[in-house]
Image: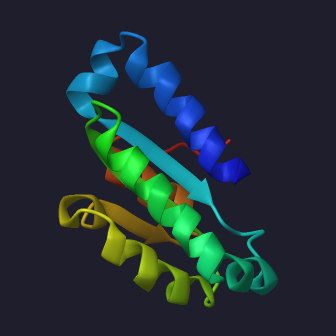
Amino acid sequence: MEVALAHVWLLHERVLRPDPQAQRCGVTFVQDLSGFGTDLIFELMRPSAMALQAKFVHFLTTCFPIKFGTLVVVDAPSAFWMLWRVVSALLPVEMVEKVHFLYRPTAAEELASLLGVKHTID
């Protein structure tokens, strides 16, 4: 629920407040799931949690006048794929096609390439 609320807050900040660049280029999300444990994934697979996620997806995709850009998931654990199969079936196809899964150690370079920016190592 905290992740969902954070995304709604971000959308409010970037979309409901005038932001011409967000409207023109789309909003890009990067979600690091490296700390996403198997226990949490199975918790999210409970029917009541799935119902809440379905409501959130509906809210996210219908209530905001938003253009989505690239959606990036970093270091998704192997158990995440069960959840992704269910959630992706609820999303519009054009949104699912924008989702990219990246893994460390090459995630930073791949993300820079996806976003069309030059990646520099500090």
Q: Nearer the viewer, residue 105 or 15?
A: 15
Q: Most extreme residue toward the top, as rendered?
A: 18
Quarter of the rendering occupied by the N terminus = bottom right
Q: Is residue 109 above or below residue 28?
A: below
The percent position of residue 92, horizontal first and vertical second, equals: 24, 62
Task: Give whichever of 79, 91 is nearer the camera.
Answer: 91
- Between 33 and 104, the one lying in front of the other is 33
Visible residue check, residue 104: no
The image's colouring method is: rainbow
At horizontal 29% and vertical 66% (from top left) the residue drawn is 96
The structure residue drawn at horizontal position 34% and vertical position 53%, both measured from the top left corner, is 114
Taking the image as shown, residue 54 lies to the left or right of residue 95, namely right
Q: How many marks?
A: 0
Q: Is residue 14 left or right of residue 93?
A: right
Residue 17, percent from left and from top: 43, 12
At x 58%, y 55%, the residue is 31
Q: Would you place residue 61 above or below residue 54 in this image?
A: above
Q: Examine the rendered structure and indicate whether residue 42 appears above or below residue 40.
A: below
